[in-house]
Image (cartoon, rainbow, N blue to C red):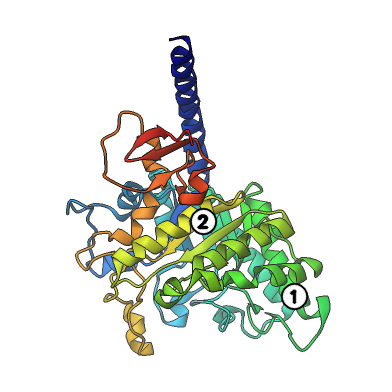
Amino acid sequence: MKKMNNWVLAAVLMFCGAQEVLAQSDAEAQAFARGADISWCTEMEAAGRKFRNASGTETDIFVLMKEIGMTAIRLRVWVNPVKFGYGAWSDMADVIAKAKRAHEQGLDLMIDFHYSDFFTDPGTQTTPMDWVGMTSAEVKSLLAAHTKEVLQALKDEGVEPKWVQVGNETNNGMVWDFGKIDWSKSGSARYADYVAMSNAGYAAVKEVQPHAIVIVHIAETKNASWFFKEFRAAGGKFDMIGLSHYPTEEEWNSSASTATYSNILAANHVKTAISLFGVPVMICETGFNVSKPALGSQVMKDLFDRMQAIPKCAGIFYWEPETDGQWKPSYYTKLKWGAYSKGAFTTIGKPKATLDAFGGSTADVRSAVGGQSTLNPTRYDLRGISLNASTLQRHGLYVQDKRVHFDKR
């Protein structure tokens, strides 16, 4: 009887300890940003698009993002899209209006400066039309002034971004040719012009929002280690590394044993970057085929499990989930472009299963005690990370079907 009592006492103590860990897991889950870039939302609303929650009730898109489980919103900023011809979307006024709506919902904010009048990426970093014909020194000054103007306008509205990107997917620099990386040169010389522009943005952010985390953002996780090694050696400044990661169906279906499994590779690249540079890493953009939400849900849940298990991985942002694969900006017709194919909403404006992971992978853990069974066969550790057969053996306590279990093997 004494032995039995000791066993019961031990089990109770472990269960109580589990509840304490669960509370800590909640705090950790909140620190890991679950976000979305919904910069198109005002343009969609102006075109008559509505958004609805899971039950079909029409609602505000920012309210809906919070209901889905998002903790943060990312918004891009263009310099003068009206002059470019796109229209008054993602200019300073539009960004401020959206940022205020996000702030009202208690959502953290990331501001993404493109330093252009339209989208920028590794292959396109077009100088704003208003800056054309200027000297390099003048462009650097204008870049800093634009940064400060937008951030000060937000500050005047009581909105302070948690993160600020100085440039978008700047693998080859920014504001070409003023800040273009010159690959014909070697060492730090090739980055000199880009570093001058990027650091001007960094300093401008800190002047207005000294506590904001400044992100330098590039495409593809595989580029992080070598790029930031050379960028930092050339004097480039950053508080956080931002990466884009868009897994494809082909990559998802490839063999993990051959190290071509997209999310595994991405996680390894993130771990390496954190180890090399000692700063957090954010997945600033991700997405999946809008027509395959069930598979998208698997991919995103897997991505969350892998990234949340990495200390100093700061979070994941889905790019333009509110689209349905059919809507497109009116300007796209002029360009003869099709609709964006990696949204995560239905045509009537309801979120698809692709976004389930953004509800928080610790949901099963948080509601484990006294919760209702979801008949989910997956087992989780006390951080909400899914366990396979080998890792389960290293965890006495685990969660399954929203209940805490003890494996005494």
In this orientation, which residue lies closer to the viewer: 385 or 206? 385
Q: Is residue 249 left or right of residue 132?
A: left
Q: Is residue 338 visible?
A: yes
- Secondary element under disc 2, as helix, strand or loop, is helix
Q: Amino acid at mark 2?
A: Arg
Q: Residue furthest top?
A: 2
Q: Amino acid at mark 1?
A: Ala
Q: Is residue 61 left or right of residue 18?
A: left
Which mark identifies residue 137? 1
Q: Quadrant of residue 1?
A: top left
Q: Is residue 315 visible?
A: no
Which mark identifies residue 56? none
Q: Is residue 234 left or right of residue 225?
A: right
Q: Is residue 315 left or right of residue 142?
A: left
Q: Position of residue 338 (x, y in %)?
A: 33, 84
Which mark identifies residue 306? 2
Q: Residue at x 28, y 73 (%)?
A: 291
* Label 1 neighbour load within 10 Å: few <14, some 14-19, many 20+: few
